[in-house]
């Protein structure tokens, strides 16, 4: 038995624009997906997936990964979850040169499925890591991140970026611009997350932004402006002392940029009423800044606030199902004790 875990993430800045070669800065958070893998004697794959969303559901099926589980949850979420596991199995088999390898796989996650916190990336990264280790062929982190990206690229019909999988693999804060991925230093940012219980359709949202970009010059300019926001944020982080508490001045400046970023994403049509309400609730409670995180359309927002006020405000915001704090995860994928 081999058990690996990988963290989820929030976008400090840069979602959507990163698809078009602009930089993005995601940060890993201490909410993890854990994947347990036991090799089988045959080529079948048996998957048990508990709590893939914070409100919880279970997917269990036997046979090959193409089998369709029968569960009472939104079909697109189940299909996506199984698609990512399927793709992770294919990548692990290819990496280990074991095309007929079978596995019993158990997935547990603290990350909302489809909520913009990188649940799929965490499952794929942890799954490939655990499966290749179980086959005696552990991967170096860069190769692991690349194979996890390929899995997401396949499932998302070529619309994935390397940001989520690289961040989940490496941990901490990372900078992604096209194929250029690297870790960057960051202080202990005080993240507060609000979750509306829903999930946006990532493919539809990305396609919608693409259509706007192709139709209107100002949409392309908006995406380029998001890239400028990211560069300003990265410059601020470069001046901070890593792994320390950030100064109030740094939090205020980062928060301003987060607010700009949310406004630009809203202009591109990827926010939602529930997300806007949570963003404003956090800001009015004193957060330095707040924005949606991920594809949008529903899911999660992230705010910067070291006080309890934003979390309390979110808990009393209509449409917010859950609010919680999340520390920066300085460690990415790791092996857990079985």
Image: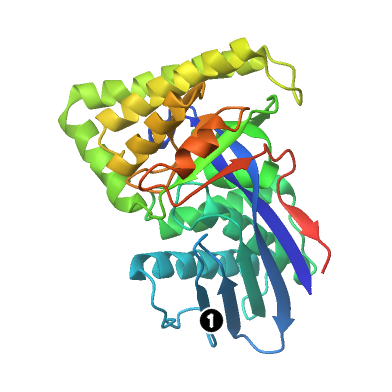
Q: Quadrant of the N terminus?
A: bottom right
Classify residue 76 by image quadrant. bottom left
Whole-percent x, y for residue 319 in the image: 36, 48
From what the image shows, is residue 262 above or below residue 99?
above
From what the image shows, is residue 17 above or below residue 2?
above
Whole-percent x, y for residue 98 in the image: 67, 74
Circle 1: element type: strand
Classify residue 277 by image quadrant. top left
Near-viewer residue (14 or 156): 14
Q: How many marks?
A: 1
Residue at figure coordinates x 32%, y 25% from the top left: 264
The residue where tag 1 is placed is 60
Q: Is residue 80 left or right of residue 247?
A: left
Q: Quadrant of the C terminus?
A: bottom right
Near-viewer residue (43 or 117): 117
Inspect this view and state whether residue 11 appears.
no
Residue at figure coordinates x 76%, y 23% from the top left: 244
Inspect this view and state whether residue 90 appears.
yes
Residue at figure coordinates x 46%, y 39% from the top left: 314
Near-viewer residue (160 or 264): 264
From what the image shows, is residue 128 above or below residue 257?
below
Classify residue 75 by image quadrant. bottom left
Question: Residue pushed farthest left?
Answer: 215
Whole-percent x, y for residue 299 in the image: 41, 48
Question: Residue pushed farthest right?
Answer: 337
How packed mark 1 is, by other alpha carbons closer than 10 Å (few <14, some 14-19, many 20 or more), is some
Residue at figure coordinates x 51%, y 25% from the top left: 287
From what the image shows, is residue 233 above or below residue 46?
above
């Amino acid at each position: 038995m081999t058990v690996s875990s990988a963290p989820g993430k929030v976008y400090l800045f840069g979602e959507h624009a990163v698809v078009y070669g602009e930089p993005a800065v995601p940060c890993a958070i201490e909410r993890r997906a854990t994947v347990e893998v036991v090799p089988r004697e045959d080529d079948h794959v048996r998957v048990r997936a508990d709590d893939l969303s914070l409100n919880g559901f279970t997917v269990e099926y036997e046979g090959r990964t193409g089998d369709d589980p029968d569960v009472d949850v939104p079909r697109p979420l189940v299909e996506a979850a199984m698609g990512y596991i399927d793709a992770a199995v294919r990548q692990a088999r290819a990496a280990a040169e074991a095309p007929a390898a079978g596995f019993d796989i158990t997935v547990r996650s603290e990350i909302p499925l489809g909520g913009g916190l990188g649940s799929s990336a965490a499952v794929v990264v942890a799954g490939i890591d655990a499966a290749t280790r179980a086959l005696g062929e552990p991967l170096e982190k860069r190769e692991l991140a690349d194979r996890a990206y390929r899995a997401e690229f396949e499932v998302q019909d070529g619309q994935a970026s390397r940001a989520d999988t690289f961040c989940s693999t490496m941990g901490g804060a990372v900078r992604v611009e096209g194929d250029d991925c690297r870790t960057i230093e960051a202080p202990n940012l005080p993240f507060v997350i609000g979750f509306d219980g829903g999930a946006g359709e990532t493919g539809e949202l990305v396609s919608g932004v693409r259509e706007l970009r192709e139709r209107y010059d100002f949409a392309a300019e908006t995406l380029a402006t998001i890239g400028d926001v990211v560069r300003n944020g990265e410059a601020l982080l470069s001046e901070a002392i890593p792994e320390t508490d950030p100064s109030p001045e740094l939090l205020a400046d980062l928060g301003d940029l987060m607010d700009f970023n949310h406004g630009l994403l809203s202009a591109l049509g990827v926010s939602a009423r529930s997300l806007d309400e949570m963003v404003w609730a956090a800001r009015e409670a004193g957060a330095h800044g707040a924005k949606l995180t991920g594809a949008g359309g529903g899911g999660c927002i992230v705010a910067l606030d070291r006080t309890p006020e934003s979390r309390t405000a979110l808990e009393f915001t209509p449409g917010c199902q859950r609010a919680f704090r999340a520390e920066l995860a300085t460690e990415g994928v790791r092996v857990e004790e079985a």
